[in-house]
């Protein structure tokens, strides 16, 4: 089944292709189909993900999957939140975002943070019953970047029980733990149930 992914993020595309492959879903990034992304103007991950999925589905004429995810830091009142990708400006520069995050936490001992993900599937743009899945990953923020894997805030997101940052994790291990992995597995289970009901006589 071909589905359009409402994202131009190469890291997300790679992760989601691996996570969704067991269901036989062939993901095509919206950019590969010549589609522009939808504006991300909502204040929650769920609303942004739903708007992106509907926009991509309409443009491609295909079912769509979208996720909106980011980092919520306790001491920063949940920032950068839905602005995670553009925390340091519209250029969406990972290095600049991380530098701003570390600077914002200077002198603050509370380093608790969580990665959050809302993942949405729609059969068509006007799908009245979208599949919505959530995932959350708890950790802490470290000042020094560690690891070459992943993207975004991964090198600064420490997984306490492992003593490693997300950037130091093997991709398979990361997918088993991460907010996006959790949301994708929940979405997979929901899609299996949905398609099983569709196939019933």
Image (cartoon, helix red, strand yellow):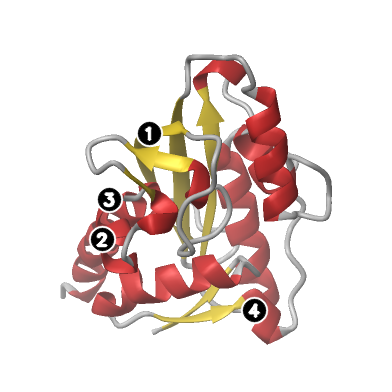
Dot 3: few (<14), some (14–19), or many (≥20) neighbours within 10 Å? Answer: some
Report x, y in % for residue 142. Answer: 49, 35
Q: Are marks 2 and 3 in contact (CB under 8 Å)?
A: yes
Marks 4,1: beta carbons within 8 A: no
Q: Quadrant of the N terminus?
A: bottom left
Q: Residue furthest right?
A: 90
Separation of disc 3 and disc 4 at Cα?
31 Å
Q: Which mark is residue 177?
A: 3
Q: Residue at x 61, y 19 (%)?
A: 76
Crowd band around label 2 with a 10 angstrom C-alpha radius: few (<14), some (14–19), many (20+): few
Horizontal arrangement in the rendering, residue 99 relative to residue 129 (left or right): right
Q: Nearer the viewer, mark 2 or mark 4?
A: 2
Q: CA distance from mark 2 to mark 3?
A: 7 Å
Residue 173 got which mark?
2
Instruction: From the top left corner, tell me how far across and down residue 121 is, in percent.
Output: 45, 60
Residue drawn at the location 55% of the way across and 47% of the way down? 153
Q: Is residue 61 left or right of residue 25?
A: right
Q: Which residue is mark 1?
A: 139
Q: Nearer the viewer, residue 85 or 192?
A: 85
């Amino acid at each position: 089944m071909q589905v359009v992914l409402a994202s131009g993020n190469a890291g997300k595309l790679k992760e989601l292709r691996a996570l969704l492959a067991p269901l036989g879903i062939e993901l095509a990034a919206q950019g590969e189909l010549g589609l522009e992304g939808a504006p991300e103007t909502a204040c929650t991950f769920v609303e942004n993900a739903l708007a992106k999925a509907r926009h991509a589905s309409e443009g491609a004429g295909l079912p769509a999957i979208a996720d909106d995810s980011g980092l919520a830091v306790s001491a920063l009142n949940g920032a950068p939140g839905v602005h995670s990708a553009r925390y340091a400006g519209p250029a969406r520069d990972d290095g600049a975002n991380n530098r701003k995050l570390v600077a914002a936490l200077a002198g603050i001992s509370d380093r608790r943070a969580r990665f959050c993900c809302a993942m949405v599937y729609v059969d068509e743009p006007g799908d009245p019953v979208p599949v919505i899945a959530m995932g959350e990953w708890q950790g802490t923020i470290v000042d020094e970047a560690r690891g070459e894997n992943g993207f975004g805030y991964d090198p600064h997101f420490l997984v306490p029980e492992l003593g490693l940052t997300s950037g130091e994790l093997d991709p398979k291990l990361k997918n088993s733990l991460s907010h996006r992995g959790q949301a994708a597995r929940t979405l997979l289970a929901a899609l299996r149930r949905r398609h099983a009901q569709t196939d019933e006589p």
